[in-house]
Image (cartoon, rainbow, N blue to C red):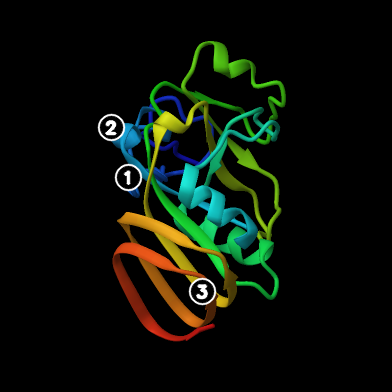
Amino acid sequence: MPRCNAVGCNWRHETHHCALCGDGDSRHVSADCPRRFACILGHGTKTGATSSITQSGLRVSSEGRLGPGIYFATIPTARVIGKWRNEGEATVLYHCEVNLGKVKTMDGLAEDKSGSWRANYDSCHGMHPPWGGRTEPFREWVVKSPSQVKIVGLEICDGTYDGHIHLPGCWINISGRVTFGGNITAGTMVLNGAHVTLR
């Protein structure tokens, strides 16, 4: 089988898809993507965490497969994870502009639970085994610091959301049937065919 044209790619495939810029026949791996300094990635979370996130931003988790940091996936993957985490509650997905900076790429499904990459890199990228509603391995990124992350939008879909949302400089997209129990402040709010109940 012919190899892809991406410099540094170890996979055996004919074309290389860059998950950051979307190039379907990329000559670079995502760790070298020109858009890695301001790429849009997703963070799917539980509804109970969203009030503190909208007030204080995303925080560094103390542990994970790639060590301490703030974890992200592509938007479609993060959406699936957000839905899986919130059975019966609203699906919550933050869209973030992320500065990955200098990226360490892990081989295959390798882990680095101690976060040894943090000594020489700004972020780490690896493949996560099937989890969180995903039946196949998926790409994940982790960054060292909240200063590398800017929340630009929030998706809320199907279910109940209790708590306040205060994101004055961001957009909020609401779809499906959502019941809100709190105040909402946003730069732009889009009701994407949504049926919204306020209580």
Question: If you read the primary sequence from the N terminus, does the residue marked by circle 1 or circle 2 appear first?
Answer: 1
The residue to which callout 2 is attached is 34
* SS assignment at label 3: strand
Check the image and name the residue furthest to the top.
119
Question: If you read the primary sequence from the N terminus, does the residue marked by circle 2 or circle 3 appear first?
Answer: 2
The residue to which callout 3 is attached is 157
Q: Which numbered disc, 1 or 3, marks the residue closer to the eye?
A: 3
Q: Quadrant of the C terminus?
A: bottom right
Residue 181 badge:
none
Can residue 9 be seen from the camera position used here? yes
The answer for how far apart the CA atoms under marks 1 and 2 are is 8 Å
Above-or-below relation of 117 to 31: above
The residue to which callout 1 is attached is 21
Q: Give the quadrant of residue 59.
A: top right
How many residues crowd mark 1 within 10 Å: few (<14), some (14–19), many (20+)? some
**Could you say which is closer to the camera, residue 95 or residue 169?**
169
Question: If you read the primary sequence from the N terminus, does the residue marked by circle 1 or circle 3 appear first?
Answer: 1
Whether label 2 touches label 3, CB < 8 Å: no
Residue type of the residue flagged with mark 1: Cys
Whether label 1 touches label 2, CB < 8 Å: yes
